[in-house]
């Protein structure tokens, strides 16, 4: 009798398993038929169950290099699976333009990744915050009150802690497995989460001390004096118009981090510009000749001189094209379904990556794309191309409503620093060997090895 019951139980289990398999099969067919009614971008091959294409991005190749290789095989638009996340990868300026114009609002969201939570005060860093009222209000404050009047005097307070800042920048760009497979939230592979928490604690203490100094000055009645830096401005603005999403301290601290990331990108860009010129000494000499002709050697460069330094501006454009601090626009997320002009249907929740490195090295747009030729921006075909997000073949600062809000300030700083350096000094390398142009992995494309130069004064005036 027991054998009969056991046999019956086993049969029931087999029947249930068979019914489940049949249900899953027909459910899969139903989904496939539903999807076939809409055209979707091709999915790259090689995706594994659960983890998708994650193993393809775990080697020594940089993210943009792997995406470029895939684009050669699958075309300018394809999808990949990063764990449970569907990601649309675009490598075409036409498609980038469409996403940043017709579908700009649809792709204005940002996924809240582990780095944003652990390093960015749980999403308070406005540059990486999800789209919504908080992001809109913070972007307005930063654009109107901070970036428009050059009040980002950060480095005098922070320079002593450059190692912490560098850790922050590097960690913000590392992949965390739980961002792709949420069920693995407990697995801290490589110890990145632990490092993020430790770095966040150090940064919070550092910036908190600075913030407390500003608060004490206001309590002592010195807030009527001239505002010294952007933190004074933030304290005033948030006192007059509080924002409900986060407390004032969190908003200010997270904004400090956002602006630090931006200032780091400026220094990364200048490092690449100098490296490219040192490897192309004829360009460096031509830039110095322009400075001598326009300014002479009896005074220093002033901000008003930059508009006359046409070749210097071309150098900056070409450097940002060839070695942009950002090679892939930080992932955005589709807030609603949309359809591109190609017919590709993009479901809500799809992540978007735009491989601007691929676009800015497209030989159909840029003849001899791997050659450093500032002169290309002086000829008629590229003369009017700008880097401010309106010309989609050149997008070092992104485009659309999530583009870098500090474009103008960044360009002003880069032009002025570069002009002052080239005008004031002869610049060479200690070994007279070509500069190593290897990139390292991180939030920005940082030079893998430090740039070492020799500076020899060249002006007649006193610096």
Image (tube, grey):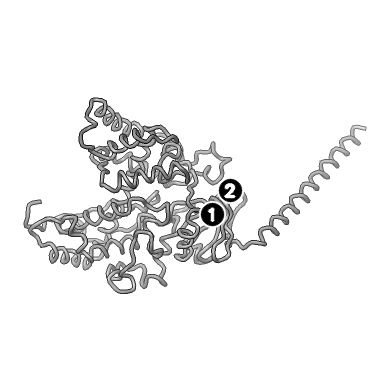
Residue beneath the point at 34% across and 66% down: 385
Q: Which residue is mark 1?
A: 87
Q: Which residue is mark 2?
A: 84
The answer to whether residue 364 is above or below residue 6 is: below
What number of labels is visible? 2
Secondary structure at badge 1 equals strand
Secondary structure at badge 2 equals loop
Residue beneath the point at 37% across and 58% down: 396
Could you tell me if the residues under marks 2 and 1 are in contact, i.e. CB atoms within 8 Å? no
| Image-based side of 148 in relation to 22, left or right | left
Name, please, the residue furthest toward the right.
1
Quadrant for the N terminus in the image? top right
Closest to the observer: 174 or 211? 211
Closest to the observer: 298 or 101? 101
Find the distance from the CA under tag 2 to the CA under tag 1: 10 Å
Closest to the observer: 27 or 272? 27
**Label 1 environment density (alpha carbons within 10 Å; few <14, some 14–19, many ≥20):** many
Closest to the observer: 137 or 460? 137
Residue beneath the point at 11% across and 58% down: 458
Residue beneath the point at 50% across and 46% down: 111
Q: Is residue 421 visible?
A: no
Q: Position of residue 191 (x, y in %)?
A: 46, 39
Q: Position of residue 120 (x, y in %)?
A: 41, 39
Q: Position of residue 440 (x, y in %)?
A: 37, 52
The answer to whether residue 386 is above or below residue 235 is: below
Q: Position of residue 194 (x, y in %)?
A: 44, 36
């Amino acid at each position: 009798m027991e054998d009969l019951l056991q046999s019956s139980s086993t049969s029931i289990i087999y029947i249930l398993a068979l019914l489940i398999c049949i249900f899953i099969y027909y459910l899969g067919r139903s989904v496939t038929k539903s999807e076939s009614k809409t055209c979707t971008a091709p999915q790259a091959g090689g995706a594994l169950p659960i983890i998708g294409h994650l193993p393809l991005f775990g080697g020594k190749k940089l993210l943009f290099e792997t995406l470029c290789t895939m684009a050669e095989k699958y075309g300018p638009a394809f999808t990949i699976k990063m764990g449970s996340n569907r990601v649309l990868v675009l490598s075409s300026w036409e498609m980038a333009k469409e996403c940043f114009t017709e579908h700009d609002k649809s792709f204005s969201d940002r996924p809240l990744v582990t780095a944003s939570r652990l390093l960015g005060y749980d999403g308070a860093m406005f540059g990486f915050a999800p789209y919504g009222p908080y992001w809109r209000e913070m972007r307005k404050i930063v654009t109107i009150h901070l970036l428009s009047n050059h009040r980002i005097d950060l480095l005098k307070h922070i320079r002593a802690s450059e190692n912490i800042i560098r850790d922050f920048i590097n960690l913000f760009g590392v992949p965390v497995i739980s961002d792709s497979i949420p069920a693995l939230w407990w697995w801290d592979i490589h110890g990145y989460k632990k490092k993020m928490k430790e770095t966040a604690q150090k940064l919070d203490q550092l910036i908190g001390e600075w913030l407390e100094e500003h608060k004490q000055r206001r309590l002592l009645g010195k807030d009527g004096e001239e505002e010294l830096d952007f933190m004074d401005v933030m304290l005033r603005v948030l006192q007059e118009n509080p924002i409900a999403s986060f407390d004032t301290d969190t908003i200010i601290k997270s904004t400090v981090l956002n602006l630090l990331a931006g200032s780091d990108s400026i220094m990364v860009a200048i490092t690449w510009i100098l490296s490219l010129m040192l490897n192309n000494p004829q360009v460096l000499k031509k830039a110095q000749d322009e400075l001598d002709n326009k300014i002479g050697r009896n005074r220093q460069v002033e901000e008003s001189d930059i508009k006359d330094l046409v070749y210097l501006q071309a150098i900056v454009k070409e450097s940002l094209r060839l070695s942009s601090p950002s090679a892939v626009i930080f992932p955005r997320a589709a807030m609603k379904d949309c359809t591109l002009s190609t017919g590709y249907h993009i479901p809500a929740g799809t992540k978007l990556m735009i491989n601007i490195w691929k676009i800015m090295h497209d030989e159909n747009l840029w003849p001899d794309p791997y050659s450093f030729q500032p002169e290309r921006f002086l000829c008629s075909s590229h003369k009017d191309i700008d880097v401010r997000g309106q010309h989609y073949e050149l997008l070092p600062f992104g485009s659309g409503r999530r583009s870098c809000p500090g474009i103008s300030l960044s360009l002003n700083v880069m032009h002025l620093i570069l002009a002052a350096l080239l005008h004031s000094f002869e610049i060479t390398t200690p070994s007279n060997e070509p500069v190593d142009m290897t990139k390292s992995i991180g939030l920005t494309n940082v030079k893998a090895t430090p740039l070492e130069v020799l500076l020899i004064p060249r002006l007649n005036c006193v610096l």
